[in-house]
Amino acid sequence: MGTLADEIARTLKHHGVTRAFGIPGGGSSLDIMDAAKRVEIPFTLARTEAAASIMAAVTGELTRAPGAVLVGVGPGASSAVNGIAYASLERSPMVLFIDGPASSLHQHFDQQAVYAPLARRTAQLRPGVGAATLSSLLTQSIHAPEGPVVVELTAGDAASDARAFEPTPHLPDAAPEPADIDGAAAMLAASRKPAIIVGLEARAHCDAVRAFADALGAVCFTTYKASGVIDAKAPHFIGPFTGASGENKALGDADLIIGIGFDAIECIPGTWPDGHAPVLMLSEAAPTNPRVPVDFAVTGDLSSTLAALTPKQSNAWRSDDIATLRGHMNDIYAPRGNGFSNAHVVQAMADVVDPATRLCVDAGAHMFAVFGLWPSAKPFGILKSNGLSSMAYALPAAIASKLAEPDVPVIAYTGDGGLAMSLGELATATELDLDITLCVINDAALSLIDIKQQRQQRPSVGVRSPLIDYAAVAQTLGWASEVIEDADALKLALRKPGRKLLDIRIDPAGYGDELARLRG
């Protein structure tokens, strides 16, 4: 008979968990790490619990199995909140193991209560039922709407004897209702100029989405999370969708808007445009959200839904109309002026970098040009925190990407503020000997907040900082590095092999106009 920790490790293996991340405490996390090693689930030590939980969440997205993260009681537990919030809003399957609860008032607070609003479920694992409880939670984590589950486990319970537990088989996703298919088919038949917004659920159904879009002849947008589900070079691709006013012109010409796996949490705050076309939502488990007024919805396995609705002939968009819409969207993001702006950086990257490269992008003003200019051709071509829009995401996401899919080249694209929040993970990447290119857009400011401050005619307070020489910092942590000040130097640096940090000094003057073109 093994211990509960042994049964937990075996349950994790059954559910496809490939790696655990974290910063262990002195309690049950040590037992789980030992048991996981025995079933060949490696453990990766991060520098912060927040970064570890982001790594686990991204691993869950890429592998479609729960990512795992281990933290200590008290401060370890509270420090993981940012990553769990990311996983909750952006539907990342993952499990957080917390040591505890604390046995005295020292480091004691209600850890499950902290995570209850974010997790799909929380539980304390105990001998006899612990593995069965975990299996149930992991099953819930990977079924729509995917998300994090959180468990507590004391050291004493982890080391206790446990009976062998056989995890239950995974259940298939529910098929759509025939009556709902009929209703959606009628809306499609009545449409002549449909527009599709492809969202995060569609990443697991790329072939079905592309086949449906091609057969329908619809113009297509992708949310940030769905970048690459529709190839950015496809003739009917219009551009990224954020819910900003700059996109209203392209949507306004449509007579039907079809959300495919589109979660309304992927929109920025605001109101849906007046006089919009009817909205048909095809999803696996789209939560209600007043941001998008849905006229009709079909819920169920997305590939099955799309196969049942695939039309026999395409619609009436003319190629000139599509070119006009795409031209309007391209104009929002195109580089302007003679300075070395963030848009010029992204354009230079697109000129020389293999388009199969995955970009992991931090929140901030630098993100807009990435989604407008990068030629993403496959699902997960760009990884970003969108629903939460967290800084300090790009580098942990790139580490997780390289561990989960070592053959996929990866670039972490971050602002100087985001890198400052995750600087210790440079050491993590060095210890793991990961081939990552890190581009830090270094303008010594929180540029997106700076722009908003200027637009509100406020004095410049709290958004600017002294310039940090990140190239010098990176060298001390085992990275090749250099300062970049123009496009030609950037192109040469990007062609160099190996792990490297490019400290890119840009002119931020164009950010304000770019935001105005996008959001009005």
Image (cartoon, rainbow, N blue to C red):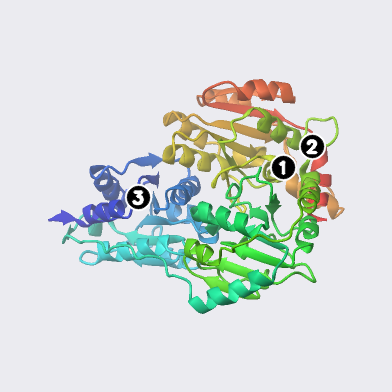
Disc marking residue 369: 1
Give the answer, above or below, for where 383 lies relative to 168. Answer: above
Q: How far separated are the C-alphas under marks 1 and 2?
A: 8 Å
> 10 Å neighbourhood of mark 1: few (<14), some, or many (≥20)?
many
Q: Quadrant of residue 386?
A: bottom right
Disc marking residue 206: none
**Position of residue 67 measured from the top left corner of the image (x, y, whole percent):** 41, 51
SS of the residue at dot 1? helix
SS of the residue at dot 3? loop
Image point (84%, 52%), residue name: 455
Q: Which amino acid, by three-letter code, is at mark 1?
A: Ala
| Direction from residue 110 to residue 5 in the image, left or right | left
Tags 1 and 3 touching, CB below 8 Å: no
- Residue corresponding to mark 2: 335
**Position of residue 376 measured from the top left corner of the image (x, y, whole percent):** 61, 42
How many callouts does the rendering have? 3
420 or 192, nearer to the observer: 192
